[in-house]
Amino acid sequence: MDTIASFFSFITTPVSWVIVQFHSVYGKIFGPDTGWAWGLSIVSLVILIRICLIPLFVKQIKATRAMQTLQPEMKKIQERYKNDKQRQSEEMMKLYKESGTNPLSSCLPILAQSPFFFALYHVLNGIATGSTIGVINDPLLASARKAHIFGAPLAAKFTDGSSKVEALGASLTDVRVVTAIMIVLMSASQFYTQRQLMTKNVDTTVKTPFMQQQKMLMYVFPVMFAVFGINFPVGVLVYWLTTNVWTMGQQMYVIRNNPTPGSKAQAAYLERLTKHVTHHGKAGKRSERTIIKAIVAKGRDRNEFERKFINALTKAGLVAQADGAVVKGEAQAAAETEDGVVTTGAAKRQQPKRQTKAQRQSGSAKAAGEPAASAEKEDSAEKEDSAEPTTSLEKSDEPQDAKPAARQQPPKGGSNGRSRAQSGQRKGGPQRPKSPSKK
């Protein structure tokens, strides 16, 4: 480990200078020889480094998104060469090369932090051995050796002997209890961060080597931290625990606001976005418009959660545009009146209830009887109002053309029509042929 730390000694001076500057600030508040002053200096160093690595983290997210867009192509390659693993790997690497993506992009923040991590280890190791390093002179070295974090010296390790721990002014029990707790917290935070990524922010419909790699890292990294943590000084454990907590919070923010398509996190995000858009009638944030724009651009390639989101907007009378904006649909716009009051729309047409045969017959008979009853009432009213009585022998003043056309003319030929009906012949249409056996 000392050889590796010496290899990164070129950055030891800048790291020690940053720690001293933060210590000068916190020393005025908590005291220069306290563990709070030196511990918070290390925490501040982590925060400063992670802020500087934000552009790299954004690049990592973009590379991860590019890997996710290639998942359909990866699935096709897996199905095509499912019996030839070597050819499958070759086609995967060819696809990575053509698209300009790298499956190891998720390790970029860890690789970028490695120089700072080993430089800090080199500084703390110098404090433990009593040698000046970087900008840490003798007075600062003596102050750092007096600093304790919950009873454990800043430069003490889990594997140190009792004599070395006593030289730093602490007990072996305190050192091992504090370091054990910090190692467990460090490994647990790393495991939770990776598990959160695998369970919430991964498209489970497509299985790729990238997913297998992430699943392997979920179990490998915590074990690595537990094994190497017993050889880390307390200050390095503070550094690594802080950076793990930062990574966990940063990842929670990304999963909540920019989830992977097809993941459980996307389903939860689109559910929240649906409630927000339907309540306000528009997408306010730029990030929301960016995600809606990507969903609209997919067309028929949308996943289940994206289709539900589009259908929910349609039911609410909203339409997602190609630029990510959400506008009111034609039906919703037509429901607005001139004074700006939104109506609920026209009432739905209600279908009449189905009637039984008896109800239909009684209804038709009632309808036929109503005109006759009304006609009788009118005739009685005319008789009462008339001053001169009339008889049935008087001729009507109405012309002959005004007589109702419902009067039927008697059949010509007298009883010929009746005799034809009695003889069994049909009225109109083709006649039934007579049987040849009968006369």
Image (cartoon, rainbow, N blue to C red):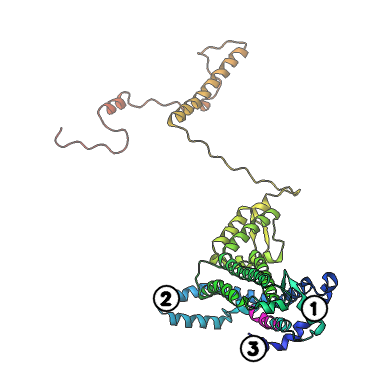
Magenta region, main secondary structure: helix
On the image, the x and y values in percent for residue 215 come to 53, 71
First of labels 2, 3 by sequence position: 3
Q: Position of residue 207 (x, y in %)?
A: 49, 71
Q: Can you say whether 108 is above or below 314 in the image?
A: below
Q: Residues within 10 Å of mark 1 (few under 14, many from 20)?
A: some
Q: Residue at x 85, y 72 (%)?
A: 28
Q: Which label belongs to residue 82?
A: 2
Q: Secondary structure at mark 1?
A: helix
Query: Does 173 sit left or right of 357 as displayed?
Result: right
Q: Which image quadrant for residue 424?
A: top left
Three-letter amino acid code at the position of disc 1: Ser
Q: CA distance from mark 2 to mark 3?
A: 45 Å
Instruction: State left or right for residue 273 relative to residue 28.
Output: left
Separation of residues labelled 3 and 1 (CA atoms): 26 Å
Question: What numbered label is drawn on residue 143?
Answer: 1
Earlier in the chain: of badge 3 and badge 1, it is 3
Left or right: where does residue 130 sit relative to residue 89? right
Q: Looking at the rendered structure, which numbered label has been put on residue 3? A: 3
